[in-house]
């Protein structure tokens, strides 16, 4: 092939690629929601998945009217409606659910309630959604609400750098420093965006930007210090810690003090997201990876079987879980390991520790993840992270 023919074919190929990309952008725009002369693009609702799932399970329904994901102002207006006066949000709502006028008026009467929480990936998710909505609409009501949320986060930080489960409530485990359900990792991820003025937080004032930087530094320092030590060796993290002594502590009656694998993976994913990690971060992540490798379980899998449907207080289930012996099953991890012996365990709502899945009552057996593959997925990401930082 001569050079002219090669160039001609290359130009034709480039033109085809350009056409495809252009058509793709047009299709994307057609799926976007048009408001007047402006076109808005969908903002992911993935961060709300936990709260949405809890709302659906509590109400035993998956079929109800929802805002189109591209209708970002419909969703953002719901988020504004749910925001409390103190700047935070209650948990377990579907922000895309279409609300009746009666419901809207009822929600407005609850503005003064102190039921705000960071649990179930809450509050920091709403702040991010509102900031992203503002970046598209430039409507200041979304900016102002996201700033109130950010002020709530900053005010809720303890002097030692931690965040509790449900500020300002300090009753029971609500007042414990919490890693479970991505409380601290999620808050720190939000603050890292704000502290570095990453989009959509490029509108922050210098003052709040500096305060976010300071809060981030305190939070990360505490997070590293909370890694549980056994005879001088770092392991993984607990789900909750006492706000003063920083000792690992239980939460709900079936969540006893423990090394917790799923929550530790969230901590590690956050640490690995930090650009140019320092030696302390690398040491912490390396130690956790070694612990995961040393405490994987083998020879069985957890299988779901169909049973008669039963309704519980917080969910219904027509499935049950059983252990099947299987020497070919992939490595699996318990969710909870004892703090000193690393023995896997479970518990019931009566607070009694058990060591077999069959000894967990059906309500907790089907309503909680006692075993999982969280560390396996982490170890894949960890191997790539090590290559990148090296």
Image (spheres, rainbow, N blue to C red):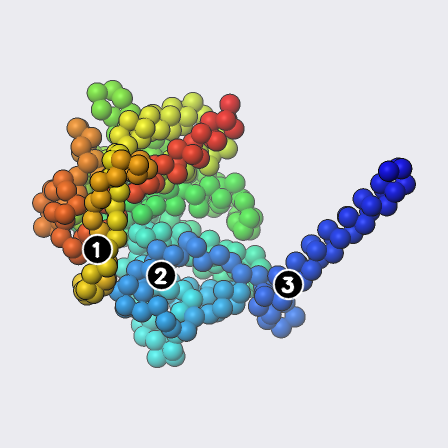
State the residue at coordinates (66%, 58%): 24
Image position of 289 with respect to 27: above or below: above
On the image, numbered disc 1 is attached to which residue?
320
State the CA–CA distance, disc 1 to disc 2: 22 Å
Between tags 2 and 3, which lies in front? 3
On the image, numbered disc 3 is attached to which residue?
27
Q: Earlier in the sequence, mark 3 or mark 1?
A: 3
Left/right of residue 379 with respect to residue 331 in the rendered view: right
Image position of 64 with respect to 319: above or below: below
Q: Earlier in the sequence, mark 1 or mark 2?
A: 2
On the image, numbered disc 2 is attached to which residue?
52
Q: Is residue 219 visible?
A: no
State the residue at coordinates (25%, 20%): 232
Q: Position of residue 147 (x, y in %)?
A: 46, 54
Residue 134, picture quadrant: bottom right
Left/right of residue 383 with respect to residue 15 in the rendered view: left
Q: Residues within 10 Å of mark 3 (few under 14, many from 20)?
A: few
Task: Give SS at disc 3.
Answer: helix
State the CA–CA distance, disc 3 to disc 1: 43 Å
Out of 237 and 61, give the one closest to the viewer.
61
């Amino acid at each position: 092939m001569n050079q002219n023919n090669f160039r001609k074919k290359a130009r034709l190929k480039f033109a085809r690629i350009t056409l495809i990309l252009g058509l793709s952008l047009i299709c994307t725009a057609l799926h976007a929601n048009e408001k007047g002369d402006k076109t808005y693009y969908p903002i992911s609702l993935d961060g709300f998945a936990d709260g949405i799932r809890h709302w659906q399970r509590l109400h035993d329904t998956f079929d109800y009217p929802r805002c189109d994901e591209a209708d970002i102002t419909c969703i953002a207006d719901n988020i504004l409606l749910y925001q409390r006066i103190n700047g935070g949000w209650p948990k377990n709502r579907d922000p895309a659910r279409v609300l009746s006028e009666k419901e809207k008026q009822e929600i407005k009467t609850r503005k003064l309630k102190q039921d705000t929480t960071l649990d179930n990936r809450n509050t920091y998710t709403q702040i991010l959604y509102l900031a992203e909505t503002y970046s598209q609409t430039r409507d200041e009501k979304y900016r102002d609400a996201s700033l109130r949320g950010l002020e709530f986060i900053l005010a809720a930080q303890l002097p030692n750098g931690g965040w509790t489960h449900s500020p300002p409530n300090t009753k029971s485990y609500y007042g414990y420093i919490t890693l479970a359900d991505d409380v601290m990792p999620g808050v720190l991820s939000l603050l890292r965006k704000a502290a570095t003025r990453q989009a959509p937080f490029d509108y922050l004032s210098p003052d709040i930007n500096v305060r976010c930087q300071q809060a981030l530094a305190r939070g990360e320092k505490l997070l590293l210090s909370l890694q549980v030590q056994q005879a001088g060796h770092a392991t993984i993290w607990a789900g909750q810690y006492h706000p003063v002594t920083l000792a690992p502590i239980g939460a709900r009656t079936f969540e006893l003090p423990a090394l917790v694998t799923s929550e530790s993976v969230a901590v590690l994913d956050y640490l690995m997201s930090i650009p140019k990690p320092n030696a302390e971060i690398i040491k912490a992540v390396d130690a956790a990876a070694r612990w995961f490798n040393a405490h994987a379980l083998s020879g069985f899998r957890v299988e779901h079987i169909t049973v008669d449907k039963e309704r519980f207080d917080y969910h219904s289930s027509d499935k049950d879980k059983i252990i099947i012996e299987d020497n070919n099953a992939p490595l699996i991890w318990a969710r909870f390991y004892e703090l000193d012996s690393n023995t896997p365990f479970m518990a019931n709502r009566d607070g009694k520790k058990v060591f077999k899945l069959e000894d967990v009552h059906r309500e907790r057996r089907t309503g909680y993840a006692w075993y999982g593959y969280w560390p396996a997925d982490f170890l894949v990401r960890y191997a790539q992270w090590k290559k990148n930082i090296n």
